[in-house]
Structures are given as structure tokens and as C-alpha cells.
Image: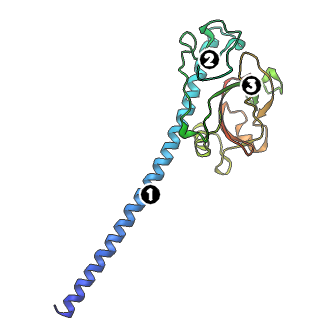
């Protein structure tokens, strides 16, 4: 083989190698982008599931209220929950998770949306700032549905879906939330959410997600504003 021909062959081989490397890089970057997009899509799906289920429960509560079920007789008892039996509720028609009442099937949030296993909480010992009447006592305590231990990214996505601001890209921060008392018919007052500069984005919002101090992220839905 002549030297010129040998040089041409090597030239074409180098071009082929360069093209193959460029193609491999493009495929790798495309795969990486696809994984990132799937991750974002998954976060949006998990956020949507939480928001939609809470809305479903809220509508059931509203329907029972329209049927004349009193605030203090609402019951959230279910085999999957502990401590929600309400002595004021004598039949299924005041139970949210009963076919005769709200007819809602209790469903836990996906484990993929949580940092640790945890169930929904139904509480009436906190106020949301500027929702209902903010009185700082039991008379103004809102009935809330709360999901603890939400993953930060899912929490932020929830706020995006609800048009709640995420300051600097992170969910709002509030130092006050009390989830220790399951609702069994009586309201109390412990904390107000959304009354701090770091959580002002939650003021007046009937649903949102935030970080409690340095601890976990919480989603809440106001079932009854008071």
C-alpha cells in the first residue's frame, strides 16, 4: 500500500472514531436527560396524588356537613388509623371512611413520596393564618388533614401545583405545627401556621406544603375553616 493511501485510511478511521465518540456522548446525554425528566414527572405524579386525595376527602367532609352532620360528630376512624373514634358519632352516616357517610376509601400516600413511613393526620388544634377567623384559640382552630414526612422535592412540587410560592426554590418554613392530638370531635388551639416571615406564602392558603423548623416537611389541607 502506498504511503498516501495508508494516510487516507488512517484519516478515515480517525473520523469514524470521532463520529462514534460524538454519537456515544449524545446518546449518553439524551439518556441522562430522560432520567431527569422521568424523575420530575414522578415527583409531579406523587404530588398530584397527595393533593387530589386530600381534595376528595375535603369534598366528602363538605357533603356530610351539607347533610347536617355537625362539626363535633365527624369521625375519621379507620382500621388503618389509631385514636380517631368519636363518641359523638353513633352511626356510619357521620364517618368519613364509611359507605354510609363520606364513602371514602382510606388510602395512604405513596411510600415514594415520603422520607419515612407515616399516615395521614386529622387534627383541629392549629390555625392557618388568614384562613377562616384567626383567633388564637379553639374557636378559630381549623380542621386539617396533614401528611407528615413529605420528600422536599415532592413538597415543592405540591406548592407549584397549588400556586404557593417556594421561596428561593424551597418550601416555606414555619416553626409551628402540632399533630399530636387526633380529632375526635373537639377543637383546641396549639399553633398558628403561616404567621411568620418565612411562612408568609402560606397565609390565606387552604392547602400547601412547608418545612416545620429543621424537621420534616408537611402537606396540609383545610377540611373546615373556622
Q: Which residue is mark 3?
A: 181
**Residue at image location 73% in from the left, 28% down from the top:** 131
Residue furthest to the right in view is 136
**Could you tell which of marks 1 and 3 lies nearer the N-terminus?**
1
Determine which of the numbered discs, if any, sits on residue 110 in the image.
Answer: none
Relative to 161, 130 lies left or right: right
Residue closest to the far left: 1
SS class, disc 3: loop
* Above or below 79: residue 5: below
Question: Quick one: label 2 or label 1, which is nearer the N terminus?
Answer: 1
Tell me the residue at 63%/18% (across/down): 77
Residue 143 seen in this snapshot? no
Q: Could one spot residue 37 in this view of the protein?
A: yes
Name the one closer to the observer, 12 or 77: 77
Q: Position of residue 153 (x, y in %)?
A: 59, 46
Neighbours of disc 2 within 10 Å: few (<14), some (14-19), many (20+): some
Looking at the image, residue 184 lies above or below residue 153:
above
Cα–Cα gap, marks 1 and 3: 45 Å
Residue wearing tag 2: 62
Q: Position of residue 109 (x, y in %)?
A: 56, 32
Name the secondary structure under disc 2.
Answer: helix
Q: Residue at x 71, y 9 (%)?
A: 88
Foreground tag (3 vs 2): 3
Closer to viewer: mark 2 or mark 1? 1
Tell me the SS state at disc 1. Answer: helix
| Residue lying at the far bottom of the rendered structure | 3
Q: Residue at x 59, y 27 (%)?
A: 54
Q: Nearer the viewer, residue 55 or 132?
A: 55
Comes first in the chain, label 3 or label 2: 2
The quadrant where residue 166 appears = top right
Which disc is residue 32 wearing? 1
Amino acid at each position: 500500500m502506498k504511503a498516501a493511501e495508508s494516510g487516507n485510511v488512517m484519516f478515515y478511521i480517525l473520523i469514524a472514531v470521532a463520529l462514534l465518540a460524538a454519537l456515544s456522548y449524545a446518546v449518553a446525554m439524551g439518556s441522562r436527560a430522560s432520567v431527569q425528566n422521568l424523575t420530575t414527572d414522578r415527583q409531579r405524579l406523587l404530588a398530584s396524588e397527595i393533593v387530589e386525595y386530600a381534595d376528595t376527602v375535603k369534598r366528602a367532609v363538605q357533603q356530610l356537613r351539607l347533610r347536617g352532620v355537625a362539626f363535633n360528630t365527624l369521625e375519621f376512624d379507620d382500621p388503618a388509623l389509631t385514636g380517631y373514634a368519636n363518641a359523638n358519632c353513633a352511626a356510619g352516616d357521620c364517618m368519613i371512611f364509611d359507605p354510609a357517610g363520606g364513602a371514602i376509601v382510606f388510602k395512604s400516600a405513596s411510600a415514594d413520596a415520603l422520607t419515612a413511613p407515616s399516615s395521614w393526620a386529622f387534627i383541629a388544634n392549629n390555625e392557618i393564618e388568614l384562613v377562616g377567623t384567626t383567633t388564637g384559640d379553639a374557636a378559630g382552630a381549623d380542621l386539617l388533614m396533614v401528611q407528615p414526612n413529605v420528600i422536599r422535592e415532592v413538597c415543592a412540587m405540591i406548592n407549584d401545583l397549588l400556586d404557593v410560592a417556594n421561596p428561593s426554590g424551597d418550601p416555606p418554613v414555619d416553626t409551628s405545627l402540632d399533630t399530636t392530638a387526633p380529632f375526635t370531635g373537639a377543637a383546641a388551639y396549639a399553633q398558628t401556621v403561616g404567621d411568620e416571615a418565612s411562612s408568609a406564602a402560606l397565609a390565606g392558603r387552604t392547602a400547601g406544603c412547608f418545612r416545620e423548623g429543621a424537621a420534616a416537611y408537611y402537606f396540609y389541607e383545610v377540611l373546615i375553616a373556622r
